Image (cartoon, rainbow, N blue to C red):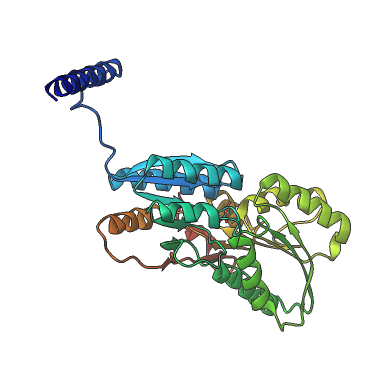
């Protein structure tokens, strides 16, 4: 027994020596090793738009403001990268996981793993589709249905104002099966439903990308030529890709064609001021503050709102556009 204790003591001393050697090798003493404090793992979709880049920047800035350590991973537009990132957050034992799901389907397994690990999950920007209860703590993001509805209602007002009898619409949609794509389409279609002046010629997937916006517009102009009256595009990036194609075809966007966009980034607002876009519905990327406040509430064991929508506005040729303040993204 005495012999065993001696052996254990030697073992403990060896372990302590190894630990201090390791810490010295890292250039830190034990006391200097930093505790990350409250740790948030966030999986971002990618960098496909000015909106997305603004959203990432806002989350980084707000994490710093609120003293929350951030493990940020960029999934480069791939769902499998987001799933792998969430698994890394679980392995790392972060306090809270947040992510912006690129599409709605396919998250159940990894979210079950987060639940088993006891880590709360917050959805940022986009929603998921699931039959399972309790995988998600809350969703912080825009009301995409209302954005689409505001876009459709603007078009109805514009048709009234100009006394137009018939409008052929083409729709360039965001990433297939993503929440903003589904909801912006549903809200817009509902707003124009029953208005016999409106015909949707085609909806085409532009994946929220500028290059795809240009490709889609080339295809639409080749197919429908000058019978197009309205381009409804689900984000600024695709709109900004489509505009040069419209001009190359000898058509004047904003006067020959009604252009409706969503996001409200600075570049699109500048083009709205030039009269080449008629309407931009705001979708704010500034979700960082609500996210950090929710993370703190979870840490303190407080109740959180299951759904947080920021308030959003519409910018259009119905107002004095020179008064629109700088957008910050
Ligand atoms: O989910 C929000 C959408 O994603 C924005 O409208 C778009 O620009 C972004 O890429």
- Residue 67, compared with residue 35, is above or below; it is below
Residue displayed at 19% across by 23% down? 8
Quadrant of image for the N terminus: top left
Q: Toward which corner of the image does residue 101 lie, by quadrant?
A: bottom right
Q: Is 120 positioned to the left or the right of 263 in the image?
A: left
Residue 303, position as x, y percentages in the image: 30, 66
Residue most extreme to the left: 2
Residue 88, position as x, y percentages in the image: 46, 40
Please name whichever residue, 166 or 307, is drawn nearer the observer in this view of the structure: 307
Residue 298, position as x, y percentages in the image: 31, 58
Please name whichever residue, 93 or 223, is drawn nearer the observer in this view of the structure: 93
Q: Is 101 positioned to the left or the right of 16 in the image?
A: right
Q: Is 184 positioned to the left or the right of 249 in the image?
A: left
Please name whichever residue, 63 or 106, is drawn nearer the observer in this view of the structure: 106
Please name whichever residue, 284 or 264, is drawn nearer the observer in this view of the structure: 284
Residue 185, position as x, y percentages in the image: 66, 67
Residue displayed at 88% across by 58% down? 223
Instruction: Please tell me in which quarter of the rendered image ligand 1 is found.
Output: bottom right
Residue most extreme to the front: 1
Any part of residue 23 in sight: yes
Residue displayed at 66% across by 74% down? 158
């Amino acid at each position: 027994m005495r012999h065993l204790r001696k052996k254990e003591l030697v073992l403990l001393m060896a372990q302590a020596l190894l630990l201090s050697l390791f810490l010295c090798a890292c250039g830190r003493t034990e006391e200097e090793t930093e505790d990350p404090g409250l740790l948030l793992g966030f999986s971002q979709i990618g960098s496909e738009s000015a909106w997305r880049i603004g959203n990432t920047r806002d989350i980084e800035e707000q994490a710093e403001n609120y003293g929350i350590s951030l493990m940020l991973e960029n999934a480069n537009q791939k769902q499998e990268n987001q799933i792998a990132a969430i698994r890394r957050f679980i392995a790392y034992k972060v306090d809270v996981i947040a992510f912006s799901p690129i599409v709605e389907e396919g998250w159940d397994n990894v979210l079950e793993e987060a639940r088993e690990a006891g880590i709360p999950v917050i959805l940022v920007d986009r929603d998921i589709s699931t039959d399972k209860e309790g995988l998600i703590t809350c969703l912080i993001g825009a009301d995409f249905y209302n954005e689409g509805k505001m876009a459709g209602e603007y078009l109805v007002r514009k048709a009234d104002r100009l006394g137009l009898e018939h409008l052929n619409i083409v729709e360039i949609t965001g990433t297939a099966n993503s929440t903003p794509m589904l909801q912006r389409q549903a809200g817009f279609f509902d707003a124009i439903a029953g208005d016999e002046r409106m015909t949707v010629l085609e909806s085409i997937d532009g994946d929220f990308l500028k290059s795809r916006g240009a490709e889609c517009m080339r295809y639409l102009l080749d197919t429908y030529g000058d019978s197009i009256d309205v381009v409804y595009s689900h984000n600024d990036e695709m709109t900004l890709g489509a505009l040069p194609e419209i001009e190359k075809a000898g058509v004047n966007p904003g006067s020959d064609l009604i252009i409706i966009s969503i996001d409200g980034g600075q570049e699109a607002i500048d083009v709205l001021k030039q009269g080449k876009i008629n309407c931009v519905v705001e979708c704010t990327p500034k979700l960082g503050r609500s996210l950090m406040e929710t993370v703190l509430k979870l840490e303190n064991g407080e109740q959180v709102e299951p759904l947080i929508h920021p308030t959003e506005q519409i910018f259009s040729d119905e107002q004095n556009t020179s008064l629109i303040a700088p957008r910050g993204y």
